[in-house]
Amino acid sequence: MSVPQTVETALADRPVEGATCLEAGAGVGNTTRGLLEQGAGHVYAVTNNAEHAQDLRSSLNSHEASRTSILEADLQSTPLQSNAVDLITAHGLCNVVPPSALGRISAELARIAAPGAHLVVDDYEPLPDDAAIRDLFAVENAASELADGTPALTFYPSDMLRRVFEGHGLTFDRKRILLDPVPWTVSHVKAHADLARKTASDLPRRLADPLAAELDRLVEEIGSESTGTMYSLAFRMSER
């Protein structure tokens, strides 16, 4: 699997070679592979999804696996020691973190960052008011909030995330644009709709059926759309 251009661009100005790194919210491991390709000494890939962890283990060759530790853990409280990591990445993480958990996760990432460590946070600006895909994400959030009281997606403005991480002792370094506009493909649209349907399936029929019908309508109506912006923020931990 190739490393996405957005990952390569976000890491291009960071000192990866030989560094002890952390991918926060590993997902399918795109950033872990990007770090390994750029010569990371060791990568901790942290995810709370057992299926993602297994898929990542299976995708690494023996040399990559020897330089990777895949940890199934909650990012609000990881098993890593304080001051342990030289470079932390959070690529597309924050948009799936509810506001109630964002402060604890950012504090935990600051805790494990070594003096002088780098942190790269890549995410999405809130979508424009006229973006059709906003309606799909609104239904996805409605299903999630009805199911467990938390939104599935939260698009944080870059200035807000900057203030959050600066509040934990990190110094802002730079901002760059990774995508403008963001290409939300047919497969992206379908994947979000499928996740929302799965969440809604556990709700009472009187709630689940209208949500499923609206998802079907939106998938057909949207197809694909290019809208919004993906940004990359870089920070440095103080030399404490």
Image: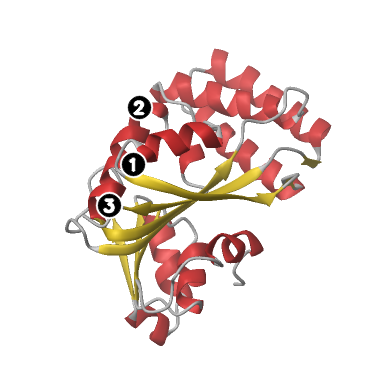
49 over 65 or under it: above or below: above
Front label number (1 vs 3): 1
- How far apart marks 1 and 2 lie (CA) works out to 12 Å
Front residue (pair 237, 10): 237
Disc 1 or 3, which lies upstream in sequence?
3
Q: Classify 10 Å Cα crowding around label 2: few (below 14), some (14-19), many (20 and above).
A: few
> What is the x, y in percent for residue 195?
56, 38
Residue 97 visible from this viewpoint: no
**Residue lying farthest to the bottom in this orientation:** 63
Which residue, as the protein is rendered here, is positioned at the far top?
Answer: 206
Circle 1: residue type = Ser
The residue pinned by badge 1 equals 106
- Residue 211: image quadrant is top right
Report whether 166 appears left or right of 132.
left
Q: Nearer the viewer, mark 3 or mark 2?
A: 2
Residue at left offset 38%, top offset 61%: 53
Q: Which residue is the extreme one toward the front?
A: 239
Q: Decide: few, some or many residues near mark 3? Use Cα within 10 Å; few <14, some 14-19, many ≥20.
A: some
The CA span between labels 1 and 3 is 15 Å
Q: Amino acid at mark 3?
A: Ala
Q: Residues within 10 Å of mark 1 (few under 14, many from 20)?
A: some
Secondary structure beneath dot 1 equals: helix
Q: Residue at x 46, y 71 (%)?
A: 35
Measure the alpha-carbon separation of dots 3 and 2. Answer: 18 Å
Marks 2 and 3: in contact by CB < 8 Å?
no
Circle 3: element type: loop
**Which mark lies nearer to you, 1 or 2?**
1
Dot label at residue 73 = 3
Which residue has dot 2 on it?
A: 100
